[in-house]
Image (cartoon, rainbow, N blue to C red):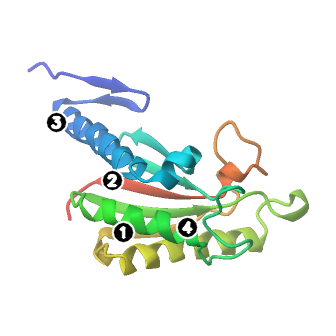
Amino acid sequence: DAVQEVKNSEGNFDSVAAVELMMLRQMAQNLMEALSQDPLVQENEETFELQILSDGVMVSIFDRTQTPLFKKDSAEFTQYGNWVIGGLAWVLDRMDSFNIDLAGHTVQGPNGVSGSDAVWAISIDRAKAARELLVRRGLASERIDRISGYGDSKPMRGFPPTSDANRRIDVHLRIGQN
């Protein structure tokens, strides 16, 4: 009973998971193709990052200084953020075999203070705002299993805690039963 294994950076997978992994890779490719069709995304390539995980795909959407998703120090979307999350809702609605978790992240607090109440509050408020907009734009609310706010506790690897790469919404698409 030999089991064929597929390896990636997250671990080993049996043959059933290998099929799911192939689905994830195809989904990630389809997602990036759909998102990159728009000229705004083509101009702002650093808006999205996709990462294949052992249980799904993580789409990180960055709130960059040059292309802000949110108005400064708030959970209110900019016009650009409204467009990005609205477009993502359209794409996610067509990928109905995945459960969705949303997580808000932000930069280190004022004066280098980590873990302040303000960074926790804005990260959860932004994750909630993303959920509300995704649902308003047509994604079924039952598809979203969880929203979380991590404040500044989980910075992006390779970036300082104050980098705008840490202001982001993570959309985790997990393989699961709906």
Q: Residue at x 22, y 61 (%)?
A: 96
Q: Mark 3: which amino acid?
A: Val
Q: Is residue 26 above or below residue 71?
A: above
Give the secondary structure at mark 4. Answer: helix
For label 2, the residue is 174
Sequence order check, earlier mark of 4 and 1 = 4
Q: Mark 4: which amino acid?
A: Gly
**Callout 2–callout 3 Cβ contact below 8 Å:** no
Q: Locate the C terminus by quadrant.
A: bottom left
Is residue 59 or residue 1 the one in the foreground? 59
Q: Is residue 123 visible?
A: yes
For label 3, the residue is 16
Give the distance between the C-alpha atoms of the residues marked 4 and 1, in whole angstroms.
Answer: 22 Å
Q: Where does the image place residue 33, in percent across and percent down from the top left? A: 35, 44
Give the distance between the C-alpha atoms of the residues marked 3 and 1, in whole angstroms.
Answer: 24 Å
For label 4, the residue is 81
Q: Is residue 55 visible?
A: no
**Callout 1–callout 2 Cβ contact below 8 Å:** yes
Sequence order check, earlier mark of 3 and 4 = 3
Q: Where does the image place residue 154, in percent across and percent down from the top left? A: 64, 52
Give the distance between the C-alpha atoms of the residues marked 3 and 4, in whole angstroms.
Answer: 37 Å
The label nearer to you, 3 versus 4, is: 4
Q: Residue at x 8, y 21 (%)?
A: 1
Q: Is residue 139 above or below residue 68?
A: below
Give the secondary structure at mark 3. Answer: helix
User: Quick check: 24 left or right of 154?
Assistant: left
Q: Which mark is residue 145?
A: 1
Give the distance between the C-alpha atoms of the residues marked 2 and 3, in whole angstroms.
Answer: 15 Å
